[in-house]
Image: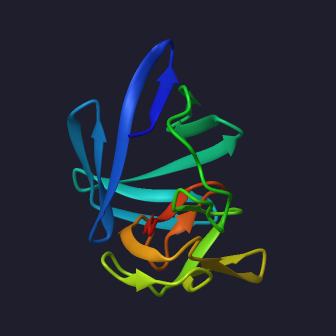
Amino acid sequence: MPAYQHNARTYNLTLIPVGEGYRVEVDGRIIVVEAVEPRPEGLRIRLDGRWHTVYVSRAGKTRWVTHAGRAFRFEQAAPRGRRGRSGGGGGDGQVRSPMPGQVRAVHAASGDVVSQGQTLMLLEAMKMEIRIQAPCEGVVAQVHAEQGEVVEKDQMLITVTCDA
């Protein structure tokens, strides 16, 4: 569970895709985001039946979230565990996005047996198609992004449990 700090307070945050939106857990509190629509002017989200436009930007481990003229700065807290190399993996089976982009296709699901180098997902970034490949032979433990979703650099895309 990623941890972020804002005004010297640490928040544990988990986003779980549900239908067209997300179930957001913040320190045990659940917020349901009914829909997310990426737009050039920002992300449109629906909370409690009302549409809001939010802007999210990232610089290193800092995320800025702007809503209704107010900006909130979140710093990623202490690193958690090992990370795979961006976009391709590493021995730990964590597959992360090499750059911001949009998921064009997902070719794997939880429970699928995969071979090292097998294409698991297609990402489009800057008019380029990027093949996201399995870092090892193993089983897909979890798919963290879905088709059409806009992802950020280093965002977790897929977790593969690697065979020993």
Is residue 6 visible from the viewing direction of this image? yes
Give the image quarter of residue 108.
Answer: bottom left
Give the image quarter of residue 116.
Answer: bottom right
Give the percent coordinates (x, y) of residue 113: 39, 83
In the rendered structure, the answer to whether residue 46 lies left or right of residue 115 reads left
Q: Is residue 55 above or below residue 161?
A: above
In the rendered structure, the answer to whether residue 35 lies left or right of residue 119 reads left
The quadrant of the rendering that contains the N terminus is top left
Colouring used for the render: rainbow
User: Residue drawn 44% across and 69% down?
Assistant: 163
Q: Is residue 29 above or below residue 151?
A: above
Q: Depth check: give the residue in front, 63 or 141.
A: 141
Is residue 72 visible from the viewing direction of this image? no
Give the percent coordinates (x, y) of residue 151: 57, 63
Q: Residue furthest front?
A: 164
Give the image quarter of residue 65.
Answer: top right
Give the percent coordinates (x, y) of residue 146: 43, 74
User: Residue drawn 61% across and 55% down?
Assistant: 84
Give the percent coordinates (x, y) of residue 155: 56, 55
Q: Is residue 132 above or below residue 158?
A: below
Q: How many marks?
A: 0
Q: Residue furthest top?
A: 8
User: Residue drawn 42% across and 64% down?
Assistant: 144
In the rendered structure, the answer to whether residue 124 lies left or right of residue 119 reads right
User: Residue drawn 28% across and 30% down?
Assistant: 27
